[in-house]
Image (cartoon, rainbow, N blue to C red):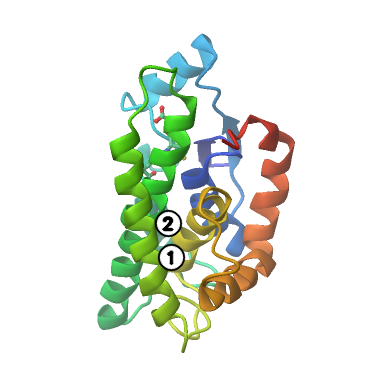
């Protein structure tokens, strides 16, 4: 099996990459990284010193591919399947990338900020940063609410890398800033993402680790 994925099932950016594998039934050898374990962490950082996952190793091409969006692009290019995650049309491709960036920067990363702050020891919290993150997510929810009034998936009719980005970002954002009662289009889109078999599988595989999530 040439593809090896370094990841953790609970980690939201890892779920984003897993969706791409599961969409197209791409086989891979799983390497679950436990950053709290010195050996596991050191082994992983020998591959990618930055220490953030997911990271893909393609042993057939001797390539190391970090970053969830780049992993999706790489799989789409080298291991394509029935779901084309980056549209072939260049005009649609940049729009899919824009939406992927939107979910990463304005939902996913601020959500991470809020969750990470819960794990900080007392005295080291960053309330100002958390307020900024919440404001960003509120703004993003308002924009998604408008955008999804007329769409099924983030790009319209076709599932794409933008939906891979949206699914785990909205899953965890909904836990820290629930949108169900306030943003009906976001909630409807999220319900559809939850039914998508690729994401449903990623969520199912994360369940054994849910107790590790800091509920606040
Ligand atoms: N931009 C990166 C972000 C990856 C990222 O933040 N991963 C988190 C898990 S969801 C991580 O590695 N956290 C461990 C740490 O920061 O020490 C991507 O898209 O892959």
Q: Is residue 79 above or below residue 28?
A: below
Q: Give the camera-side residue of 32 and 155.
A: 155
Q: Are marks 1 and 2 in contact (CB under 8 Å)?
A: yes
Residue at position x 53%, y 39% in the image: 11
Q: Give the farthest residue toward the top.
A: 38
Query: Where is residue 184 shown, x and y percent of the image?
Result: 56, 77
Quadrant where ligand 1 appears? top left
Q: Which residue is mark 2?
A: 72
- Label 2 residue near ligand 1, CB within 8 Å: no
Whichever of labels 1 and 2 marks the residue nearer the N terminus, that label is 2
Q: Is residue 85 above or below residue 110?
A: below
Q: Give the camera-side residue of 5 and 111.
A: 111
Query: Where is residue 90 shown, x and y percent of the image?
Result: 26, 79
**In the displayed structure image, the side of residue 61 where residue 195 appears, left or right:** right
Q: Is residue 13 above or below residue 194?
A: above
Distance of mark 1 from mark 2, alpha carbons?
7 Å
Residue at position x 35%, y 78% in the image: 88
Q: Which residue is mark 1?
A: 161
């Amino acid at each position: 099996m040439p593809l090896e994925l370094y990841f953790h099932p609970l980690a939201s950016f890892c779920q984003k990459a897993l969706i791409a594998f599961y969409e197209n039934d791409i086989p891979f050898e799983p390497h679950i990284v436990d950053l709290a374990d010195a050996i596991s962490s050191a082994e992983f950082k020998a591959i990618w010193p930055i220490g953030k996952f997911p990271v893909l190793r393609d042993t057939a091409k001797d390539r190391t591919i970090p970053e969830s969006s780049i992993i999706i692009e790489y799989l789409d290019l080298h291991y394509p399947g029935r779901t084309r995650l980056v549209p072939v049309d260049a005009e649609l491709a940049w729009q899919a990338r824009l939406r992927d960036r939107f979910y990463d920067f304005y939902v996913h990363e601020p959500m991470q900020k809020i969750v990470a702050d819960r794990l900080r020891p007392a005295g080291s919290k960053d309330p100002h940063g958390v307020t900024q993150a919440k404001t960003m997510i509120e703004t993003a929810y308002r924009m998604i609410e408008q955008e999804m009034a007329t769409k099924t998936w983030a790009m319209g009719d076709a599932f794409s890398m933008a939906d891979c980005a949206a699914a785990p970002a909205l899953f965890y954002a909904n836990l820290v800033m629930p949108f169900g009662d306030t943003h009906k289009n976001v909630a409807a889109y999220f319900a559809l993402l939850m039914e998508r078999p690729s994401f449903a599988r990623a969520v199912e595989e994360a369940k054994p680790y849910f107790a590790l999530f800091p509920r606040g």
